[in-house]
Image: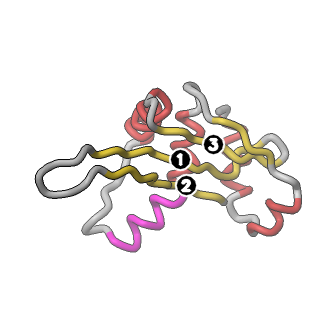
Amino acid sequence: MTEQSVTELRSIQSIPYAAVAAVNPTIRRAVVGDERTLAELNAFVHELHLRQNPTYFTPTDPEEVAAWFRGLLESPTVKTWIAEASALPVGYVSVCWHERAQNPFCRARRWLETAGWRT
């Protein structure tokens, strides 16, 4: 993501959801190389979480967040998509597949965990 697109992303974050939806966003699968874009999209909501509950959430380092997203993108159990409007990223969603074998305490189970953000 270039410095110009980061600036454009920050300006588009103030646009209401209806306005973003009106430009017909496209959805594409995130790939390795998109980790900085995902980190930038995530920063907006994480800042809200941090302000709301600073005893639980911690300040983040953009490089560490990008590395964390890269790990997700490399994981075979995680799928991530990016929404773009006018070729600018405006949101994302990640889906993580969990599977637990039966053990003496509970039955086997499978579930999906989702996380995402839109501007």
| Mark 1 nearby-residue class (10 Å; few <14, some 14–19, many ≥20) | many
- Sequence order check, earlier mark of 2 and 1: 1
Q: Is residue 106 above or below residue 36?
A: below
| Mark 3 nearby-residue class (10 Å; few <14, some 14–19, many ≥20) | some
Which quadrant of the structure image shows residue 44? bottom right
Q: Residue furthest bottom?
A: 52
Q: CA distance from mark 2 to mark 1?
A: 6 Å
Residue 98 locus on image (x, y percent): 37, 46
Q: Identify the secondary structure beneath mark 1.
A: strand
Q: Which mark is residue 81?
A: 3
Disc 2 + disc 1, Cβ < 8 Å: yes
Q: CA distance from mark 1 to mark 3?
A: 7 Å
> In front: 106, or 99?
106
Q: Identify the secondary structure beneath mark 3.
A: strand
Residue 8 locus on image (x, y percent): 73, 47
User: What's the amino acid at mark 3?
Assistant: Trp
User: Which residue bears the numbered disc 2?
Assistant: 116
Residue 45, magenta (yes or no): yes
Point out the stretch of residues depicted in magenta: 44-53
Viewed as shown, does residue 82 lie left or right of 45? Answer: right
Q: Is residue 47 above or below residue 1?
A: below
Q: Is residue 6 above or below residue 24?
A: above
User: What's the amino acid at mark 2?
Assistant: Gly
User: Which residue bears the numbered disc 1?
Assistant: 94
Residue found 53% across the figure and 47% down from its top: 94
Disc 2 + disc 3, Cβ < 8 Å: no
Q: Identify the secondary structure beneath mark 2.
A: strand
